[in-house]
Structure formats: C-alpha cells, structure tokens
Amino acid sequence: MPVLRVTNVTAGYGRLVVLHALSANFGRGRVTALVGPNGCGKSTLLKAIMGFLPASGGEILIEGQPIRLIGRKALAKRIAYLPQECQCPDYMTLGELIELAGYSRYSLVGGPSARDRQLFAEILDLVGLADKAGCQVNSLSGGQRQRAWIAMVLAQEADVILMDEPVNHLDMKYQYAVLGLVRELSARHGKTVIVVLHDLNLASAFADDVVMLRDGKVVAAGPAQEIMTAANVERAFDFEADIFSRDGRVVCLPRMSHAEAVAA
C-alpha cells in the first residue's frame, strides 16, 4: 500500500485550475521525482499535499488517512516540506535553525529533550555540518546552506519529505552531493521522498520513480528506468530526445535541429 496516495485531485489558485483530476502514488523508502515543463503543476502538487492549497476535488491520503482531517502540528510530525526559497534572520545560527524543526514534538512549556539534541547532532554530522552548529546560517556557502535546510527537514523526523527544487541554485558538485544524500537517507531510513527536479538526467540518476506531468495531468508514472523514454519526454516537454543507457543509467540527450547543429 502506498504511504501517500493522491487520487483525482483538482486544485489551483482561485479561478486558475492547475491540477486536473491528478492521481499518483508514492511508496515507502523510495525517491520519486516530479518532472515536467514550467507551469505543469509540480510545485502546486506539493502545496496541495501540504494543505496550503485546498483541493476542489479528489482526496489526498497518508497511510489511508485524509490529510485534510489532520491538524497542522500533527501533520508536521508526518510530512516535512522544503520550499524553493528558504530564508532566515541573519542572527540565526545553524543550531537554532535545526531546533526549530522539532517544534511539533515539544510540549507547550518545554523545549528540545536530550533525545532531540542527540538527534540534531547526528543529523548535522550526517549532512557534514557538525562543526558549523554555532555559525550563522546566512554566513554559510551556498552548498552548506542547502545542506542546512535539508538538515532542518530531516530534524522533523517525518516519514514523508517533500522537496521543491532543492538543487536549483547549486553547482553540479553540490547537486550530486545533495541528491546522493537524499537517496541514501530514503533507502537507509525508509523515508518517502518526493522531489521536484528540472534536470531529467538528475531524475534518472537519483530517483527510484518518476511522475511526469504536463498541463496539470500525469503523462506517465512508474520506475524511472521505464518512464524515461523518448516518447514520454516528447509528450511531456514537446521536444525530441535520444534516450540511451550508460553504465546502468538512463541518459537523456535533447536532439538539435539542423540550424542549431550548424550554429554549434
């Protein structure tokens, strides 16, 4: 049974409908990449799952329970969300940022427990920032900041993690480092990870499953090795690409027109 099930969900912004009766399933211990052209509904789907956008139709279930019936604090124990843009005050240290992530577990009068603090230390070590706890978040490098935000998400200890373009502003080295960490955590700890990606080659390299969207509908969904086909890419993105396997990985190479080839 999927940990998270989206069934015939319709949602959008006011009168603008973005998702049209969309259905998708997300399994435990698997990384699922949401891919598709700009405006196809990838980020909107994450917001609908979080309840930031009310669905006008359909249902979203986590382990069989409708998300709309779960309170915000209870939902924070089960789903962690990393938006595209993250900001914090200049004075905030990495340690303080990580502590914020555990708010859903704290009592009304208490703060982090000894177990919480041990967990935070382990997570910072896991993302390679154990020696940066006292540093201001905004003083870190771009790659370090992104790992800091991922650490904050992990500190929620949620079973489901939603990540909206987590590597969009990183160079190739850190893109691979961050997504490698995400994949390792999913496999080791059984996390259900849903990540929005623009690069199809990153999706095929790090995702177990792919949900390919266009115009708020699912074009194809399933194991990455099966979904990454030339036909599916053309249906979703409206361009031709050569899809081939190299060292066990699927590679997507867009085809160049004759004029582009001459110019190159």
Image: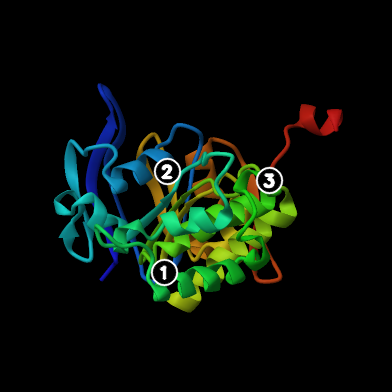
Instruction: Determine which quarter of the picture holds residue 247.
Output: bottom right
Report the side of 14 relative to 251 (left or right): left
Secondary structure at badge 2 equals strand
Residue 232 - label: none
Residue highlighted by disc 3: 139
From the image, state whether disc 3 or disc 2 is nearer to you: 3
How far is disc 2 from disc 1 in space, using C-alphas? 23 Å
Quadrant for residue 53, please give it: top left
Q: Are marks 3 and 2 in contact (CB under 8 Å)?
A: no
Which residue is under mark 2?
213
| Camera-side residue of 58 and 252 | 58
Q: Is residue 168 left or right of residue 83?
A: right
Q: Residue at x 14, y 52 (%)?
A: 69
Extreme front residue here? 109
> Amino acid under label 3?
Ser
Q: How many neighbours does mark 1 have within 10 angstroms: few (below 14), some (14-19), or many (20 or more)?
A: many
Q: Is residue 41 above or below residue 49?
A: above
Where is mark 1, residue-wise?
A: 191
Q: Is residue 186 visible?
A: no
Is residue 132 something that shows in the picture?
A: yes
The amino acid on which the numbered mark 2 sits, given as a three-letter code, is Leu
Q: Quadrant of the N terminus?
A: bottom left
- Residue type at mark 1 is Lys
